[in-house]
Image (tube, coloured by chain):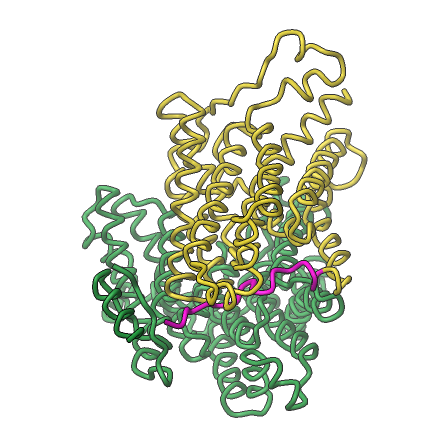
Chain colours: A green, B yellow
Amino acid sequence: MRIELVKRPQHSALFSALSPFIALGLTLIAGAIMFSLLGKNPLEALYYYFVDPLTGLWDENNRWQLHELAVKAAPLILIAVGLSVCFLSNNWNIGAEGQFTIGAIVGSILPVMYPDLQSWIVLPLMLLMGMIGGAAYASVPAYLKARFNTNEILTSLMLVYVAQLFLDWLVRGPWRNPGGMNFPETRNFHEYAILPEVWSSSGRAHWGFVFALVAAVAAWFMLSRTLRGFEVKVLGQSPRAGRFAGFSASKMVFFAFIVSGALAGLAGISEVSGAIGQLRPTISPGYGFAAIIVAFLGRLNPLGIVAAGLILALSYLGGEAAQISIGVSDKVVRAFQGMILFFVLACDTLIHYRVRFVGAPAAKAAEVSQNV
Amino acid sequence: MFESILITIATAATPLLIASIGELVVERSGVLNLGVEGMMVMGAVTGFGVTLATGSPWLGIFAAIAVGALFSLLFGFLTLTLVTNQVATGLALTLLGLGLSGMLGEGFVGQPGIKLGNLYIPYLSDLPVIGRLIFGQDPVFYLSVLLTVAVAWFLFRTRAGLTLRSVGDNHGSAHALGINVIGIRYLAVMFGGACAGLAGAYLSLVYTPQWIENMTAGRGWIALALVVFASWRPWRVLAGAYLFGAVSIGQLHAQALGIGVPSQLLSSLPYLATIVVLVLISRNRRLTMVNTPASLGRPFVPDR
């Protein structure tokens, strides 16, 4: 038997809407098989992964879990929205984890180095500096691509390792908390440097989630309603057509990287100032990479990304819940997330192609009839 | 002292060399597989686990090669049969490999590993200066050199190699000539996966005989960069791998000497060196244009 692809005359609207759902369904099935292999009851495991964290929807006492969901979803959505602009314009920024880290570092300069500066102006400055830091760090691979034609995938990824080592040096060296008993962490941020909760009475979801929603709506508007958004897509799909239209590919490289770097930087400083409250050697459970999955699961559409970000955030929370309740390792989460991306990419084929299963004899017959 | 430094450089360079040579064949066939890191880390965890269970590093190595090839089939099925985006699918393979290996290897953390023994030839291995360097290293080191020779010979001196390169340079014409483009690409992708698996096993059985999560630490990506650096030529991959081996061993020695530079800065040198090298190579547009396989990363759907 052979699989054959037949190009559809037009891309299928039905499957572009359905493919993320098919992919999620397949992931659930594959996940159930994986849990059975691990010797767990698959239904119970899936319950803890995907339902238990949502009980806050109807249960007043579990409302905090919804807040945790928003805390986890905020960086994922912020980063993925930026990545969607990059990927749509055919710029492969996969160093968002590094831009997140540098954003967090640059944003933390004020509360760490000038702790005596206590005023309402600190927080907006921190957020702004975080965005500038992330954007500046992202513009390095952009510059190298535009100027020297260097592969941006490899350079942006290498800079992730560099950024993480830089953070490690800072928190163990010059930025270590003077009163912190030699732990590798900075001093705790003072109250003016903390990103406040949105709804402090019921949980700790901070304003980062609101930023994420605003960014998603803004990016959606930019991509679907403005000339700049059209430029992004044209240059992504056909650089030649873009050139004829007078669009500059090298300016687009900078635009895409700076937008995504700024959003990743904002995610970084929001996470540090809203969820952690200080800098540590590790400030992200791989948000920058998980956001790649979010971007594709959301079909590179900023509004779809909001939903996709919530789903991936759910998998993080579910991982914690499953570890506590049925003793499944939290390492399973990343395997799960990797599977989602595989299924999403495979299902996207259905949008552009009709898949035909051809048995060997039938294929022969088709060949013969073509020859006649 | 000098000899032992050279040997450690060879140990650091060997996994890079093996993974890069594999990826070079893949890219020569016109496929860009960014999943090297994921396949390597799967090889590392398999090699370590099988060795732990059976006590035989050789079985571990063979299992790692098999798992690397099987894992790459996942990428092959998506990009070749379902014609998905190669960049995105390669990333997916890396993310899945890192996740799966972390899950599978959880029980191996902290377990003592078994090291693959070095070769010992009486008299020859005892020769001063070059004895251990040439006659007393681990068997995979010799395999890596052999692999480079074999791939160079295959690609540029055999008909099959020419066919593979033609598929990578113009898949449309190759298809029109009756060459089975997709079949050849499947084989190339599996060869790359097998090499990456072997390279990973080398890390967990020779370089640092233990299992640490994410122990590849970006080496799969450096291997990808080496292929660009070598402008898709096997001998230059060998040179590049040893250059990078030297950089990473050099920074380790500098750390041990404590020369007053933060260790984190020294640790980031291999990554920074990768960027510098990529810039130096790619700024010469003509060189890269001539050598890059022309169909690299482009989707191929046969017209029937």
Q: Looking at the rendering, in which quadrant would you find the N terminus of chain B?
A: top right
Quadrant location of residue A112? bottom right
| Residue at the farthest top position | B123
The stretch drawn in magenta includes residue B302: yes
Q: Where is residue A89 in the image (x, y as percent from the top left)?
A: 57, 77
Q: Is residue A147 visible?
A: yes
Q: Can residue A186 be seen in this view?
A: no
Q: In the image, is residue A67 above or below residue A304?
A: above
* Residues in magenta, as a range: B288-304
Judged by its main secondary structure, the magenta piece is: loop
Q: Looking at the rendering, in which quadrant would you find the C terminus of chain B?
A: bottom left
Q: Which of A255 and A99 is in front in this view?
A: A255
Give the residue at x 52% y 79%. A215
Quadrant location of residue A50? bottom left
Q: Nearer the viewer, residue B51 or A130?
A: B51
| Residue at the farthest right position | B259
Q: Which of A278 and A292 is in front in this view?
A: A292
Q: In the image, is residue A115 above or below residue B239?
A: below
Q: Where is residue B90 in the image (x, y as percent from the top left)?
A: 48, 57
